[in-house]
Image (cartoon, grey):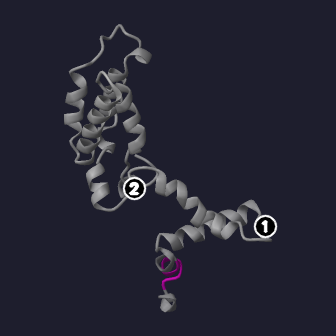
Amino acid sequence: MGLFGERASYLIYFYHLCEYLAAAAPGANEKQQKKWLEKQKKALKNNQVLKVLNNLSTRLEPEHIADKFAPVRVGVRYIKNRLEYMNYKDAIDANLPIGSGKIESAHRYVIQKRLKLTGSWWTVENANDMLALRILRVNDDWQSYWLNLNPENSSLT
């Protein structure tokens, strides 16, 4: 179990998973491959991972073929080894990101907005502390953090 134990759930980065599927896509041309891939993505977003595995398994390459020439087998293995981390439907229903776009763009408005002010400079320790406070505020945990730190002081709410 990870650092957060039972309090957290993990999700495979959707784009990365789709890279495996794209490599394994059947079809004589790009249009057919895209159509197949879109069907698999839709199925994954509806938690129909077994359907995707079935679609792939009908075209598994023989074991004697090296992995670099067996994208279907590699994709099937990747998915089977991570089944518990593909609950995309619940993440989507909870309005959580299934890709990294929101995370990657957050560095601009969470980190840089505060740490890159004109004329400011930080020691590593102070920058880490400031970043932790910024993350608390962005996650709407500001008040609960301070209350848990000092429960007698409820004037912060």
**Residue at the (27%, 43%) spot, across then down:** 44
Is residue 90 in the magenta section?
no
- Left or right position of 13 against 44: right
The one nearer the camera, 98 or 152, is 98
**Residue at the (44%, 17%) spot, across then down:** 68
Q: Compared to 60, does 142 lie above or below?
A: below
Q: Compared to 48, does 4 lie above or below?
A: below
Q: Position of residue 33 (x, y in %)?
A: 31, 30
Which quadrant of the view contains residue 74?
top left
**Residue wearing tag 1:** 121
**Residue at the (29%, 48%) spot, across then down:** 87
**Residue wearing tag 2:** 97
Q: Position of residue 107 (x, y in %)?
A: 58, 59
Q: Give the Cα distance between marks 2 and 1.
A: 32 Å
- The residue segment tinted magenta is 146-151
Is residue 150 in the magenta section?
yes
Q: Main secondary structure of the magenta part?
A: helix
Q: Position of residue 86 (x, y in %)?
A: 31, 44
Which quadrant of the view contains residue 56?
top left
- The number of discs equals 2
